[in-house]
Image (tube, rainbow, N blue to C red):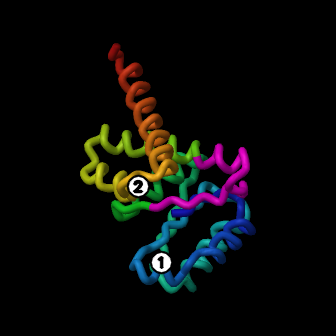
Amino acid sequence: MICTRNRAAQLTEALGRLDRNEIVAESAELVLVDSASTDATPKVIAEFAENAPFPVRQCRVHRPGLGRARNEGVNVLLPNVRVYHDHRRKLGTPGGDEALRDYDFGRGAYYASLLQRGVGGAWQLWSAGTPVSEPMPAQTAERLATEMEGASRYLRHLAVSRGAT
């Protein structure tokens, strides 16, 4: 799933970097979500969908917002979701590493929200995104700990907002 707003040039670049062969080999589909763009983004999406060698679902939200766009994209998907975000930061730099930690934190909160809503298969989705081996590499353990922290904070916030102590 790719969510975008008013980034036609960046979207064209990102779509050009997709591994088309991998998407076809996995029988996957791509969801492109336009978040109320006012530039050429809808045209870029339509042209890409028309020429892609794999299924492309297009959707649009009429009010801007990344959360709204993601929710709309998830609403039209299969249960196994991969979200890509071109954050333009280089891995191994403070900004790049911080962005990855933030994504891990948010992913944990997202999976906790699925579990809280009783979405079947949420545990399977979560575990599919975290390959586990023995012994667990330190990087995987750190990522999983950050995801769990995000899940914990989400659930704690939900409990407090509902009046639990």
How many callouts does the rendering have? 2
> Do the residues bearing badges 1 and 2 touch, measured as CB atoms within 8 Å?
no
Please give the range of residues in magenta. 82-100
Reply above or below: 163 against 13: above
Picture quarter with the C terminus: top left
Quadrant in the picture for residue 47: bottom right
Disc 1 designates what residue? 23
- Kindly give the residue lying farthest to the front in the view shown: 135
- Looking at the picture, does residue 85 appear above or below residue 112? below
- Bin the neighbour count of mark 1 within 10 Å (Cα to Cα): few under 14, some 14-19, many 20 and up: some
Vertical relation: 127 (above or below) 149: below
Find disc 2 in the rendering and name its residue. 130
Give residue 111's position: percent from left, percent from top. Answer: 38, 45
Q: Amino acid at mark 2?
A: Thr
Asked whether residue 128 is drawn in magenta, I would say: no
Q: Residue at x 45, y 82 (%)?
A: 24
Q: Main secondary structure of the magenta part?
A: loop
- For marks 1 and 2, the one nearer the N-term is 1
Quarter where residue 113 is shown: top left
Q: Is residue 32 left or right of residue 89?
A: left
Q: Position of residue 135 (x, y in %)?
A: 38, 53
Between 66 and 107, the one nearer to me in the picture: 107
- Tell me which residue sits at (56%, 62%) in the image: 2
